[in-house]
């Protein structure tokens, strides 16, 4: 009889230990709000979560790329907008310079255009952080500088574009092309020609600069349209990335999150079962002790 009682006690003790372990695990899950707290909880689900988290990291890199691309394109657009304003004023002054005016007026316009050349150079050498945005891939070196021998602006960048990955299948070059950058140099030199023509006081020389000035303006307008289109593509990619991030987060949550109301009910049931088992075991062990005494 004593052996049977001991065996029953041992079985009940193992049951209590198992209930305690289950209760502890569920308490941990409820506290964290996650169904999976250890890989052994659900190895298959853990594998799926790790795969989803890898996708999240890759998407986060695409999001960072898109933000960088957008900043570059916004800086480029701002620089082009500044050049457009200067071009508008230059064409206005060129028209005025072909009419009858005094040499003092012509000289005053020449001084204004000289200042505009300096401003245009600043716009053409716009930077995003430490990178020159109108330099192709040679972003560390100032792309537009005046040659001290010729007095003309030279483009020192290259014709390459730096593609930025926005998704597995999509890349974008966030700024202007190398050929457009070379055309910007021509636009700056058209300004220099206008300055010199106004300084000469000769309306015919001023008139001769107008075609190049108009070409320069067309270059800037076309570049603004191109960069604006690039920004639209980047914004669309960012919207897709945001949707993808939300979807991935939801899938990770579905795999690992805990149904809290159900878990609390189950925890209450475990606690009740644990207390009942503890009481039964105590009773059995007390009976065993009495048997032993007898």
Image (spheres, rainbow, N blue to C red):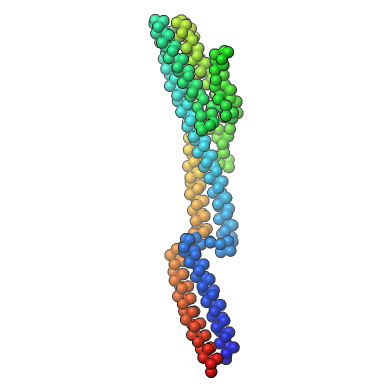
Instruction: Look at 57% across and 29% down and name the residue there.
Output: 140
Picture mark count: 0
Q: Nearer the viewer, residue 248 or 134?
A: 134
Q: Quadrant of residue 96?
A: top left
- Relative height, residue 98 to residue 283 (above, below): above
* Most distant residue in the front direction: 293
Instruction: Look at 50% across and 14% down and name the residue there.
Output: 192
Residue 170, position as x, y percentages in the image: 56, 39
Question: Which quadrant, please, contains the N terminus?
Answer: bottom right
Residue 102, position as x, y percentages in the image: 39, 5
Q: Nearer the viewer, residue 44 or 287?
A: 287
Q: Is residue 225 among the parts visible in the rendering?
A: no
Residue 11, position as x, y percentages in the image: 56, 81
- Relative height, residue 144 to residue 275 (above, below): above
Instruction: Look at 50% across and 48% down and name the residue there.
Output: 245
Instruction: Look at 47% across and 26% down and name the residue there.
Output: 79
Residue 236, position as x, y percentages in the image: 48, 39
- Relative height, residue 22 to residue 75 (above, below): below
Q: Is residue 82 among the parts visible in the rendering?
A: yes
């Amino acid at each position: 009889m004593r052996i049977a009682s001991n065996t029953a006690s041992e079985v009940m003790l193992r049951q209590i230990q198992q209930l305690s372990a289950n209760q502890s695990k569920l308490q941990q899950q409820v506290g964290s709000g996650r169904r999976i707290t250890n890989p052994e909880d659900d190895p298959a689900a853990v594998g799926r979560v790790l795969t989803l988290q890898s996708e999240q990291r890759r998407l986060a890199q695409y999001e960072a790329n898109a933000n960088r691309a957008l900043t570059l394109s916004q800086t480029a657009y701002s620089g082009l907008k500044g050049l457009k304003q200067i071009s508008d004023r230059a064409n206005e002054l060129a028209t005025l310079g072909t009419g009858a005016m005094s040499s003092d007026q012509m000289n005053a316009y020449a001084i204004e255009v000289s200042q505009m050349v300096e401003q245009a150079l600043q716009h053409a050498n716009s930077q995003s952080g430490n990178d020159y945005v109108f330099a192709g891939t040679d972003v560390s070196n100032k792309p537009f500088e005046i040659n001290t021998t010729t007095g003309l602006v030279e483009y020192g960048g290259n014709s390459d574009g730096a593609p930025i990955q926005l998704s597995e299948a999509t890349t974008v070059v966030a700024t202007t092309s190398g050929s457009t950058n070379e055309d910007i140099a021509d636009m700056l030199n058209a300004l220099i020609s206008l300055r010199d023509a106004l300084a000469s006081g000769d309306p015919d020389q001023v008139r001769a600069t107008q075609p190049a000035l108009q070409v320069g303006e067309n270059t800037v307008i076309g570049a603004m349209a191109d960069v604006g289109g690039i920004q639209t593509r980047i914004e669309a990619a960012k919207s897709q990335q945001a949707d993808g991030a939300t979807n991935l987060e939801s899938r990770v949550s579905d795999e690992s999150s805990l149904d809290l109301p159900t878990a609390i009910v189950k925890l209450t049931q475990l606690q009740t079962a644990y207390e009942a088992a503890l009481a039964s075991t105590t009773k059995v062990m007390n009976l065993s002790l009495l048997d032993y005494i007898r």
